[in-house]
Amino acid sequence: MGERWCAAVLRVLVLQAAWALAGGQVRYSVAEEAKAGTVVGRLAQDLGLEAGEAEARRLRLVAQGRRASVEVSGASGALLVSSRLDREELCGKSAPCALRLEVLLERPLRVFHVELEVTDINDNAPIFPAARKNLSIAESSVPGSRFPLEGASDADIGANAQLSYTLSPSEHFSLDMQRSEEYRESLFLVLTKPLDRETIPVHRLVLTASDGGRPSLTGTMELVISVEDANDNAPQFNQSVYKVQLLESAAVGTLVASVNATDADLGINGEVIFSVSNTFPDKGINIFHLNARTGEIHLTGTVDYEEVRLYEIQIEARDKGTPSLSGHCKVVLEVLDVNDNAPEVRVTSLSVPVAEDASVGTVVALLSVSDRDSGENGRVRCWVWPASPFGLEATFAGSYSLVLREALDRERVSEYEVEVRAEDGGAPALRASRGLRVPVSDVNDNAPAFAQAVYTVLARENNAAGAELARLWARDPDEAGNGRVSYSVWEGGAGGGGWRAASSYVSVDAESGRLWALRPLDYEELQVLQFEVRAVDAGEPPLCGNATVQLFVLDENDNAPALLPPAGSAPEAGGVAAAEAAAAAAAAGSESGTLWAWAAWGAPAGQVVAKIRAVDADSGYNAWLRYELWEPRGKGPFRVGLYSGEVSTARALDEADGPRQRLLIVVRDHGEPARSATATLSVSLVEAAEAAAAAAAGSSSSSSSSSVSRSALGVELGPGAASAATNVWLVVAICAVSSLFLLAVVLYGASRWAPRAAVLSGPGPTTLVCASEVGSWSYSQRHSRSLCVADGAAKSDLMVFSPNFPPPPPGPAPKDTQPEPSALLDTVSGTVFLAFTLSLPALSHLSRPLGCCCL
């Protein structure tokens, strides 16, 4: 700064000397940018003024239109810098830069001209027109190409304004400047190396301008060189092969992949269009869609892992340059399996029907099980429902055998609905099933079976030939011929008197099992017929079943009571034959002769004088006889026991009754309609001695007989003559009944413990119970036995002696009062009795006769 000040002072001195030489003009020189207050020159002194004169004469500058940036000090008279001096502002590029000032001095008024030269300093750096210069150079420009640049400017002058240029280092560009005396220098940017926009699209360089001042000042400008593109690059994919995976269950519109290709060029040279050049397999062209602008591949159809597992799509990317360039890539699409296929069950072989005697392990069907999915989705588990009687056995992968696990019974299950179920291992698991109908064929493994082992059939006698007695039915659960049953009466298998030739009485229809009578049945000839019916099927070999039929002939009232012949008039063994003969005679209307009896005068009331004896070939209710006194009617001297047939005195006899009484007695059964027979009894009234003699004669006659037989129309004398015989037979009867009771108990116990086949039994039909004034009997159709305990023919009558009537009402009752028939018949169900045949003709004279009937 001191140096600059010394220089300024020196200049002032020089100016003053020049002013003096110039004839009064003062010249000063000051450097621009001098500080305010800097003394430019001692103006008052240089004008020859004395000290203090400048202030007194008011020395001052006169303005001339523009600010001079200097002033005159009033006190000292020196010319001072008052404000910033900028040469470039005052004079621009003009040189030299001289300011002409007028100085005014009063008393007297004088004007002085002062010239102030402002000298240049290097205070301005070079300045480019713009801080940045943008250039565009074609990528195809050749080295050596020149591109003009606009240089910088410097406000200074002289050496301070002399500019030089430099360029930042670059391998592609250099700087060339041409100077001319006539023209301003020319500045050029020279291309030294080919450009590659894709490598360096923009070059940024710095151009520096330096002036010649000391120190030198510089100015810079940034050169932004944009390389204009040429279509010299083909589109490039970021991957040559795109590998993607897609679930086969993907919905239409799913984004499959997005390919990306870039073109290093710009503009239309870098605009890429995508297209599909090839697809394998060909059907992929309809399944996938490629967006030509974005390169996105979308699903437009459905993919199926089981059909195509891999797709290859060739994609081309082409730019829009001229000529057009292209690039290629491949998209490899792998379809991933999902569990979208249920297992498939197929029957490859089916052997039906299956015989019901097929052995365990028999193969019924062959099955193939598959699943189009893979991995766990294709792993299949199989089973059979229901679990029996069939099962599955795996033969090899995907093949199964349906085998028999248990024995079959067609009669229990004739057809099976089998379901083979399969389930894969996917999540969620898919299931499938296949139904099989397995019929079971029949074999003849069941014999016909009757509903009952023993059939009890009731048939009334005198039925018509061909009448249906019953229908038998045997069930054979087999089918067709194996279950077709034919029936026949079987005669074999048993002997003895218990069996009869059934084929002469009954027959059975071979197809329907209808049991019908070959001829009318006669109860008096046949009460029970037991035989077997055999049912045979048509199988091979045939099987059969048997049932026992117990045919009970029910009695009809087809026989009238028959009066027994007089004692000794027929052989003792005549028995039933004689009774039947008598019954036939009675039915024909024959009437026996008059019977004779004796009674003593004076006999008391109730004295038995005779007993009418009769038999009915029928049984049960139809053979239950009652005796009535038909003549004389009214109050006669005699009466007849209603069921006993005893003729006794109704009152004491006297001579007024006459020597002889003729009695007409009617014997009537209880059948519907009732049948009857009549007997005439002539009672002679004699003295007591004669009556005793007659009784003795009767007793002698009866004791001489070898056996007691049934007498036709016989009479017995009064009790006075035969009381001893009555007592004897009473004892015999008691013993016989006791023995029969014990025997019945033994036989009942034996029947209970005997084998079932030996018992002739059947389901419980009703049991008829007949009752009389002295007891009751019942006849069971489930168990029957015959027992003969005396001479003569046996009758199948069961007599069980047990009182069954309630005690008589108070007061006397007539002995011969006849009870109502309905009170004498009762029905008992489900009771088993033993049946006996009891023939006690010798008891006919008991005071309480036995009432009997036959079913």
Image (cartoon, rainbow, N blue to C red):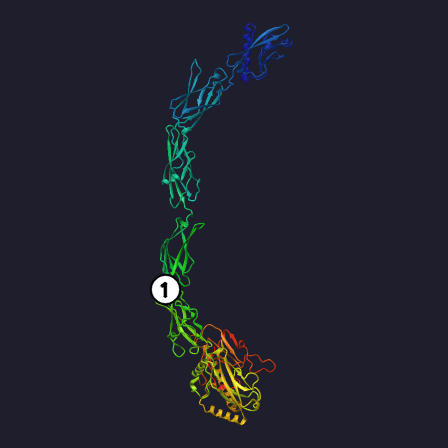
Q: Nearer the viewer, residue 71 or 53?
A: 71
In the picture, the quarter occupied by the N terminus is top right
Disc 1 packing (10 Å; few <14; some 14–19; many ≥20): some
Q: Is residue 82 left or right of residue 495?
A: right
> In the figure, residue 569 lies in which quadrant?
bottom left
Q: Is residue 652 left or right of residue 268?
A: right
Q: For the residue marked with disc 1, what is the amino acid? A: Gly
Q: Write down the residue under mark 1.
A: 481
Q: In the figure, 431 relative to 535: above or below?
A: above
Q: Position of residue 10 (x, y in %)?
A: 54, 12
Q: Is residue 388 left or right of residue 75?
A: left
Residue 198 is at least partly visible in this image:
no
Report the number of discs.
Answer: 1
Q: Position of residue 762 (x, y in %)?
A: 45, 73
Q: Nearer the viewer, residue 611 or 93?
A: 611
Q: Position of residue 487 (x, y in %)?
A: 38, 69
Q: In the figure, 567 relative to 523: above or below?
A: below
Q: Nearer the viewer, residue 269 or 306?
A: 306
> In the figure, residue 40 lies in which quadrant?
top right
Residue 310 is at least partly visible in this image:
yes
Q: In the figure, 446 relative to 793: above or below?
A: above
Q: Nearer the viewer, residue 99 or 633?
A: 633
Q: Position of residue 307 (x, y in %)?
A: 38, 45
> Residue furthest toward the left?
540
> Residue furthest toward the right?
56
User: Regarding mark 1 in the picture, which secondary structure is present there?
Assistant: helix
> In the figure, residue 354 lies in which quadrant?
bottom left
